[in-house]
Amino acid sequence: MNESLLTDFYQLTMAEIYIKKGLLKKASFEFFIRRRPERRNFFIAAGLEKIIEYLKELKFQQDEIDFLRERGFSKELIDYLKKFRFQGDVWALPEGTIFFENEPVIRVEAPLPQAQIVETRIINILHFQILIASKAVRCVLSAPNKALIDFGLRRAHGFEAGLYAARSCYLAGFIATSTVEAGRLFKIPITGTMAHSFILAHESEEAAFRNFIETHPENPILLIDTFDTIKAAYLAAKLYREYLKNGIKIKGVRIDSGNYIELSKKVRKIFDSQGAKEMMIFCSGGLDEYKLKELTKNDVPIDGFGLGTLIDTSSDVPFLDCAYKMVEYDGTPKMKFSKGKATLPFKKQIMRYLNKEGLFSHDIICTSKEAENSNNQGLLVEVMRGGKLIAKGEGISVIRDRVKEQLSSLPHELKSITNSCAYDVKFSSKLKGAINSEVKA
Amino acid sequence: MNESLLTDFYQLTMAEIYIKKGLLKKASFEFFIRRRPERRNFFIAAGLEKIIEYLKELKFQQDEIDFLRERGFSKELIDYLKKFRFQGDVWALPEGTIFFENEPVIRVEAPLPQAQIVETRIINILHFQILIASKAVRCVLSAPNKALIDFGLRRAHGFEAGLYAARSCYLAGFIATSTVEAGRLFKIPITGTMAHSFILAHESEEAAFRNFIETHPENPILLIDTFDTIKAAYLAAKLYREYLKNGIKIKGVRIDSGNYIELSKKVRKIFDSQGAKEMMIFCSGGLDEYKLKELTKNDVPIDGFGLGTLIDTSSDVPFLDCAYKMVEYDGTPKMKFSKGKATLPFKKQIMRYLNKEGLFSHDIICTSKEAENSNNQGLLVEVMRGGKLIAKGEGISVIRDRVKEQLSSLPHELKSITNSCAYDVKFSSKLKGAINSEVKA
């Protein structure tokens, strides 16, 4: 699908006025999270790959142009859109970077109508991918050393959400997704077991298990909660012993309902006493980081988890208070004073400082100019210049490794999924001056 | 984008086994909402148009086939998918129909592998559109006679969510969307005002307002909270009087932050005392049905609302507990007993009964066979037979009118957005028998 009309009507109205009135100078807009929800101590940058694809390919097709002409837009705008190619510069946090409230994730510097038209889709892309990566990483923190798999497409909000949730979960540390198209597009491992309907389509559970094992002899996993989980566990152990003789090793079972702690303990005992010690136990259904925390303490014998709805909708925090705001126009810093929604002027950069242990100590948000005069390297890097890509695209494994590495530098208290904890983000003297002028205003 | 790989990996694994083992008979699956969340007394059926489009166009492309072959799927599955066209029957509630817990919204009857492969995308489509239509209608109930407009694309979960949220809001009773592409695809009215960045790009708020009014003289709406809402209201009233002399009528103002009750009252007074009685007041920012309820009582002088994030993410209930489950295979009724997730066997139909006042009195869920022997008309209608469409597509205005009509028959207590209230849904004697057998199992 062509994405050029994935924008708010007012973006086009404003662009038209900018064109008619000659407001075509370079504008700088920054995307940031305005306020941290209590249940998110930090965020994971995600979405840049898609942003770049969007900006590079953005072009108005003839049928879209015709639609806008019929809507009454002027010849000036229509002519502008016919030739539209994004020609701006983009600075961004590399995907997988940990960041905090008020810190710019991306900066777009482009002729005003261009920077304006792309606002809606840029927010739409970044908001969702950050939302899910920042949710999924909490599951990873709650269940270290457990295999976490994304099962979320079916209840994600539309297909694009399902696809990018799979990607966001994977870069946050999940090991696979069940979504075939996400595996294909993003080169993520794909996995899956069987559904209850598969069992029901057979004359008996045993017939279903046998068909599955014989057709998919490589590491089959059996779903055991369709009728009676305990009975099915005995059956699975029996089949494990039987097929092992034929060189087929059943990998384990999945439990999709009931009391996971109780059931997994009982099933583990059955397997251990019935000659199926190597069989693994997976659980799925209604899981999130809070439930994972319960299920991974006290040696509950669950080896991996399928996570879906609660992660792909980020159900405890289904949106973030984020914005894409103009910070400079034609070299002049800009800010708005709207109550509770004031913005900070100036193109900005983020400086991160580590303590002696190598952990994040604090960040300083400063102006780009202040950063240029500093000896330190800012976190935002230039990725596009004049509409051309100047940084190489990163493979998803590079991003995934970055998350892992960044987590190893994140102070322990910020990793809590239950305690709210604010990281120390300071403003440079120049920005403090701007904030003070705002308070007076 | 081609949608055939928008499915879970296990659907393909299972389809492969069905094909190899000759499990190709007709299976019937039903989609329903398993449990009503406390804050939803009823649901609005939505998504059928997209379901039909998906099923009609479903076809595996060469690159998708190649991907699956590389993944190790067998020649039998590959050959099957190469020729795949959906050949099933579909029964569904017409979009806009009010429905309740446990009631089937759609029934797919198709050769087992087909009915299985489409599961993931069918849930993905229906779940989201029902979720948003059922959220948006609560806003309509909270603010009768107010103009409600969807502003949600930017924080919707991906673009498909943004587009279908616009459609779901419109059919629930909103009057327009700000999303250009949704307007184009679904023939929904599009509207919009201006952003804060537009004001900031100008030398002054007045210059911005004048440029806007002069370039868009048809019903302009001015955003007045960038710096000081009260001062901007006086300015707007002045401009109203001035431009009126030139035949330009400023329609109103939008307030996007602050205390809407206080501000709207002050702004109303300013307009009424400054010769701008006809100017309207719109508010946006952080609104949902609960806030609308506050803002529409006690004669708060707000004429319309822009709603975004909280509606397009259905933030108070970001997902529904729904399922697509096999109810019959090859004529034999099927059910699973999984704890808390048991399903009801038999192809089903819904009978709705009205009381003397013409309001919904109760529904009876019965088997399709029971329905065939009844004199009453069931709510589910056949829309596809053998993969061919047999019902004409409905225009969105027909669906929108249906919602309005259905709401007029909905008992008052079910319309509450704060009190949980269960509608009376009974099971037929045949289904009761099945439930009893399950309880014993």
Image: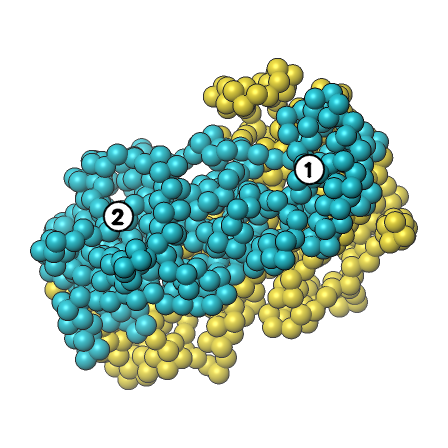
Chain colours: A cyan, B yellow
Q: Quadrant of residue B247?
A: bottom left
Residue B136 horizontal side relative to residue B179, left or right: right
Task: Report helix, strand or loop for mark 2.
Answer: strand
Q: Is residue B85 above or below residue B278?
A: above
Residue that mark 2 sits on: A92
- Count neighbours of disc 1 (C-alpha within 10 A) and say few if under 14, some if 14 to 19, many if 20 or more: many
Give the number of marks. Answer: 2
Residue B64 horizontal side relative to residue B151, left or right: right
Is there CB contact under 8 Å for labels 2 and 1?
no
Q: Determine if residue A217 is in view.
A: yes
| Residue at (34, 68) in percent of width and height | B256
Q: Position of residue B384 (x, y in %)?
A: 67, 33
Q: Position of residue A408 (x, y in %)?
A: 38, 52
Residue B235 horizontal side relative to residue B301, left or right: left
What amino acid is found at the position of numbered circle 2 in the picture? Ala
In this view of the protein, which residue sits in the foreground, B78 or B133?
Answer: B78
What amino acid is found at the position of numbered circle 1 in the picture? Met
Dot label at residue A279: 1
Position of the C terminus of chain A, as image quadrant, is: bottom left
